[in-house]
Amino acid sequence: AWLLAAAVAQLASRGFGGRGTFEDTLAVFGFGTALASWWTLLHDLVTTFLGALHVIDQRAYEDAMSSPTVFRTVLWILMAGYLVAFVALFARGVAAVHGLRGVRATAIGALSFVVYQGVFVIFNR
């Protein structure tokens, strides 16, 4: 997912006159992916730890995610942070590596995130 997102960003940036290298794009996207993924770490780490200790019933907790609870609200807030962080960090990466700014960098960052998330969903589900 990370490789393909970086490749899409590289090709899209070249289409808009970007001048960076694929290796640099790959490096900043790797960093951006690591930072943005921390948004989901909080939820996953806590619920997995509590489930492993049998403090919570994992099945009941997963069912609670399908109904309006405070836990689902917290999860959606974390997912919104995940989305914003990915697009912002990918856009900043495009700006840093390729010299593109504003709408172009944001559009390429968003497109790259859609590609990243699409591959992630295919192989993670």
Image (spheres, rainbow, N blue to C red):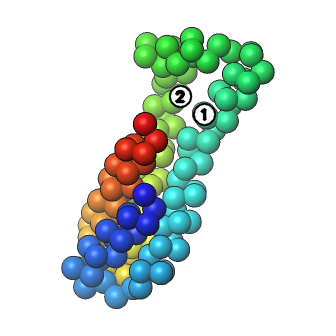
Residue at the (60%, 33%) spot, across then down: 43
x and y, in percent, of residue 19 in the image: 34, 88
Using residue 94 as the reference point, say whether residue 50 is left or right of it. right
x and y, in percent, of residue 71 in the image: 55, 21
Q: Nearer the viewer, residue 58 or 42?
A: 58
Give the crowd class for mark 1: few <14, some 14-19, many >=20 residues within 10 Å: some
Residue 21 appears in the figure = yes
Query: From this viewpoint, which residue is outermost toward the left?
Result: 15
Quarter residue 101 falls in:
bottom left
Query: From this viewpoint, which residue is outermost toward the front?
Result: 123
Query: From this viewpoint, which residue is outermost toward the right?
Result: 53
x and y, in percent, of residue 94 in the image: 39, 73
Q: Nearer the viewer, residue 101 or 35?
A: 35
Identified by mark 2, the residue type is: Val
For mark 1, give the secondary structure.
helix
- Check contact, mark 2 vs mark 1: CB within 8 A: yes
Residue at the (36%, 71%) spot, across then down: 7
Figure check: 83 above or below 60: below
Identified by mark 1, the residue type is: His
Using residue 125 as the reference point, say whether residue 38 is left or right of it. right
x and y, in percent, of residue 57 in the image: 65, 13
Residue 83 appears in the figure = no
Give the crowd class for mark 2: few <14, some 14-19, many >=20 residues within 10 Å: few
From the image, which quarter does the C terminus lie in? top left
Task: Tell me which numbered mark, 2 or 1, is placed earlier along the sequence.
Answer: 1
Q: Which residue is mark 1?
A: 43
Residue at the (59%, 48%) spot, across then down: 38
Q: Which mark is residue 58?
A: none
Q: Which residue is mark 2?
A: 74
For mark 2, give the secondary structure.
helix
Using residue 19 as the reference point, say whether residue 67 is left or right of it. right
Figure check: 19 above or below 75: below
